[in-house]
Image (spheres, grey):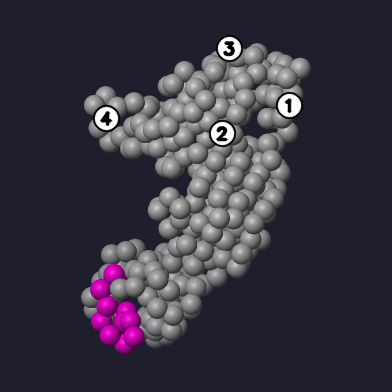
Amino acid sequence: MKEIKVKEKEEGQRLDKYLKRLLPLAKPSLLYKMLRKKNILLNRHKAEGSEKLNAGDTVTLYFSDESFDKLSQRKEETVAVELPVNPEVLFETEDLLILDKPAGILSQRAKAEDISLNEWLRDRYPAEGNYRPSCLNRLDRNTSGLVLAAKNLKGAMEGSRWLAEGTLTKRYRALVVGRPDEQIEGSAYLVKDRKTNLVRVSETKDSAEEGSSLIRFCYERIKTIDRYSLLSITILTGKSHQIRAHLSMLGFPILGDPKYGDSAENRLWKKRTGLDRQLLHAAELVLPTGERIRSDLPADFLRVMEALEK
């Protein structure tokens, strides 16, 4: 028998989620079976799994030591955790982090052999309870800038709530081809093609495809140089490739974007400056408290801006 006390930083989650983190190698069907048979109890009483946990609650598991050890053992990480360029920590509390991600680094790995911010975090911040430090929002590999991460379950729940409720403001900078209006606000509809990993954007719901998601945005033109414009972008939704695909649909592709950009412009600026990625940068996060975390434009972005101004 194992008897485990719920810690303060673990409260607020459902019992079944807690059990899955406690026993990562156990199938959900096994956990629910054990709940039904009263082999897992909450505060010495039968539980369904949907109960919300409080600090000090007792979870009792009538498992043998051998079974518990087998189901709680995580698969060993076999990849190294050194990144080509380490992210800078710009903000840190007891529960949360804001990292400045360089372009070329994944937020989370797509394949077992990948190295991402998650592996970097887990090497530097030990797991607390059953939670392993993780990124809460993602940037594309070649988009640079600010990423919110949690050090523990309490941070994950708080940060995820900010993202879900839209109380965390996210602002980006993008260098685009063309001269959009000084301000564009509104909504559109996005659908993802999982086979090609590309998305398509429709301006109206009538023309949107089945399974599309609503996206909301505000674009402001900061300056225009020749036929290029620097934009400040505030997004109220966080869908994959949202900014890149929507700006391209509007006729203002992001410079350097290999998927949605202007290939002729991309070749021109690769030749001139070595540009090899989309000039999209997550520049600012405004916390629900009003605190602002900012990230400066990276060197390759500034190099193209300087070339334009010359």
- In whole angstroms, how far apart are the C-alphas of marks 2 and 1? 18 Å
Q: Can you say which quadrant of the picture contains the N terminus?
A: bottom left
- In whole angstroms, how far apart are the C-alphas of marks 3 and 4? 32 Å
Badge 3 or badge 1: first in the primary sequence: 3
Graded by Cα atoms within 10 Å as few (under 14), some (14 to 19) or many (20 or more), the crowding at tag 3 reads few
Measured along the vertical axis of the image, is residue 22 above or below residue 41? above
Q: Which residues are magenta?
A: 39-50
Residue drawn at 43 percent across, 74 percent down: 11
Picture coordinates of residue 143, whole percent (x, y): 58, 36
Q: Are marks 2 and 1 in contact (CB under 8 Å)?
A: no
Badge 3 or badge 4: first in the primary sequence: 4
Q: Are marks 3 and 1 in contact (CB under 8 Å)?
A: no
- In whole angstroms, how far apart are the C-alphas of marks 2 and 3? 24 Å
Q: Which mark is residue 232?
A: 2
Picture coordinates of residue 240, whole percent (x, y): 44, 37
Does residue 61 appear left or right of residue 257 in this picture? left
Identify the residue at the far front of this view. 182
Q: Amino acid at mark 2?
A: Ser
- In whole angstroms, how far apart are the C-alphas of marks 3 and 1? 19 Å
Q: Which mark is residue 303?
A: 1
**Element at label 1:** helix
Q: Which residue is mark 3?
A: 264
Graded by Cα atoms within 10 Å as few (under 14), some (14 to 19) or many (20 or more), the crowding at tag 1 reads some
Look at the image and tell me whether residue 45 can be seen. yes
Look at the image and tell me whether residue 82 can be seen. no
Residue drawn at 60 percent across, 14 percent down: 227
**Element at label 2:** strand
